[in-house]
């Protein structure tokens, strides 16, 4: 006997619609009871329930994906670093100074005339002083130092970048030490919970972008390394 | 494989499925608080918390997106785009829904955009899927064959219809949560699921054959 699945029965139709969530156990109690009750008396819905369970079973068998979350996470953190460095630049001292002057001007407009001139003179002195400090100190400021983590004891040695590396599971400490000595690098942070290490290159000069890219390529070609990417601080 | 073991295997699979779905529902609720705590720490730019959250969601979100686009690289890109947004917007999360619903909602929107950007849109046929040219199975289907059949059925659906099937049957979401994830009314979720089921009817005889052959051989 063929049963019409679109029969004009609201409870039947509702039950029919709700079966997927009856199967995945997310129906609220009252609806679940209603479905249970209808299933007892409806052959078509019981048949549909069995079919949908088979479909759910098939969907539940996940594809075998070849995933590498460690590499993906390291890439994402690199993206986050770059994004946050950009944000830091957007709020650089020159912008802050403009905001400060703008605020001062607002205050000045609400002060007595004499006090206004005195404050103006004082502000001019402060501006000149700040300008002097910035001009003198600017060439010495290494922007990269803004992004050095607290765990790094020698920020200046970080120069303009470092590398994120994931070593393969079966590499020994000896292998890693040999590799790092060979490329003149040292571990400055890590491993993170996902096994990502941060390396700094021990060079007398600041490692250039090209040098870091070349080094990460060299590291990637080594059997102990699963992943290696340079992390660039912003160029001044 | 003996007939008995085939039958037992099916029974076992049925029980495992029910247990999995029940466990999914239970574990989803118990992890909700832990997720919320993690997200609060992420809002404070705690990188360790973010790493934990990343690993908790990576596989689930990749799986979800992969079923849309059948492209692992694209799926991984979408996951990183999603988690990047999570890192940036964690402080804006208002806890009106579960963290997982929020994250899947972001992933859904990114996946739809990625598909539009990289692939020709999936043309949903008005008629039921034509699977007549696919070889009919004459024995118990292997897991891979079942997956191939399922995929050929799912491929006939639009991403909107497919996602409702996936979110219900793979990820174990309630229909009101799916409505939040895909940003549509609850009734639309039910209607999409209804149409998806109708279209997938064509593959059910194949899935049936896979299981019935075990049942029949038992008798």
Image: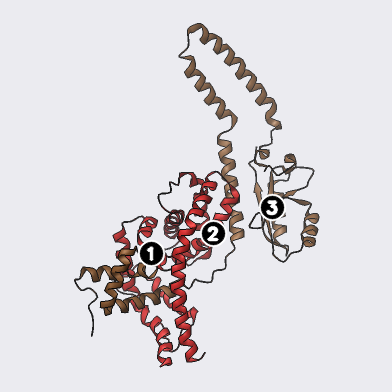
Chain colours: A brown, B red
Q: Are marks 2 and 3 on the same chain?
A: no
Per the rendering, the mark at residue A26 is 1
**Res B56 label:** 2
Q: Is residue A134 above or below residue B122?
A: above
Quadrant in the picture for the C terminus of chain A: top right
Report the side of B2 relative to B216 (left or right).
right
Of residues A206 and B78, the one drawn nearer to the viewer in this rendering: B78
How packed mark 3 is, by other alpha carbons closer than 10 Å (few <14, some 14-19, many 20 or more), is some
User: Which x, y percent locates residue B34?
Assistant: 51, 54
SS label for mark 3: loop
Q: Quadrant of the N terminus of chain A?
A: bottom left
Decide which of B163, B40 is in the foreground and name it: B40
Say which residue appears at 56% left-offset and 58% top-offset.
Answer: B55
Reply above or below: A127 against A221. above
Q: Which residue, as the protein is rendered here, is positioned at the far top?
A: A114
Query: SS at mark 1?
Result: loop
x and y percent of residue B199 in the render?
A: 33, 73
The residue where tag 3 is placed is A190
**Would residue B133 be seen by someone viewing this image from the given angle?**
no
């Amino acid at each position: 006997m063929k049963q019409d699945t679109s029969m004009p029965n609201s409870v039947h139709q509702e039950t029919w619609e709700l079966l997927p969530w009856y199967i995945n156990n997310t129906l609220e109690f009252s609806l679940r009871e209603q479905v249970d009750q209808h299933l007892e008396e409806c052959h078509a819905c019981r048949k549909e329930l069995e079919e949908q369970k088979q479909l759910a079973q098939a969907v539940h068998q996940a594809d075998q994906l070849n995933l590498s979350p460690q590499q993906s996470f390291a890439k994402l953190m690199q993206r986050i670093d770059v994004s946050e460095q950009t944000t830091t630049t957007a709020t650089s001292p020159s912008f802050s100074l403009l905001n400060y002057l703008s605020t001062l001007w607002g205050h000045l407009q609400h002060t007595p005339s004499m006090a206004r001139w005195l404050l103006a003179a004082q502000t001019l002195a402060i501006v000149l002083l700040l300008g002097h400090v910035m001009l003198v100190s600017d060439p010495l400021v290494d922007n990269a130092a803004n992004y050095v983590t607290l765990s790094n004891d020698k920020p200046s040695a970080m120069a303009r970048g470092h590398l994120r590396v994931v070593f393969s599971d079966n590499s020994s400490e000896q292998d890693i030490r040999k590799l790092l000595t060979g490329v003149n690098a040292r571990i400055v942070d890590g491993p993170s919970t996902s096994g990502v290490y941060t390396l700094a290159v021990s060079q007398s000069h600041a490692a250039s972008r090209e040098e870091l890219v070349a080094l990460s390529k060299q590291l990637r070609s080594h059997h102990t390394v699963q992943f290696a990417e340079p992390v660039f601080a912003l160029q001044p | 494989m003996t007939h008995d073991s085939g039958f037992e295997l099916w029974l076992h699979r049925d029980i495992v499925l029910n247990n999995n779905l029940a466990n999914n529902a239970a574990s989803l609720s118990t992890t909700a608080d832990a997720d919320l705590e993690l997200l609060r720490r992420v809002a404070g730019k705690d990188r360790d918390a973010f790493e934990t959250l990343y690993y908790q969601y990576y596989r689930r979100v990749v799986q979800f997106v992969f079923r849309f686009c059948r492209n692992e690289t694209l799926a991984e890109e979408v996951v990183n785009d999603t988690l990047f947004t999570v890192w940036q917007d964690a402080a804006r999360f208002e806890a009106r829904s579960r963290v997982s619903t929020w994250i899947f909602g972001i992933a859904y929107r990114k996946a739809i955009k990625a598909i539009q950007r990289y692939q020709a849109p999936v043309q949903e046929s008005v008629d039921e899927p034509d699977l007549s040219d696919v070889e009919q199975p004459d024995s118990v289907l292997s897991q891979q064959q079942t997956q191939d059949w399922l995929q050929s059925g799912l491929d006939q659906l639009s991403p909107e219809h497919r996602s409702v099937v996936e979110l219900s049957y793979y990820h174990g979401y309630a229909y009101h949560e799916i409505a939040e994830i895909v940003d549509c009314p609850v009734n639309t979720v039910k209607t999409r699921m209804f149409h998806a089921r109708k279209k997938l009817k064509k593959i059910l005889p194949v899935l049936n054959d896979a299981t019935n052959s075990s049942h029949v051989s038992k008798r």
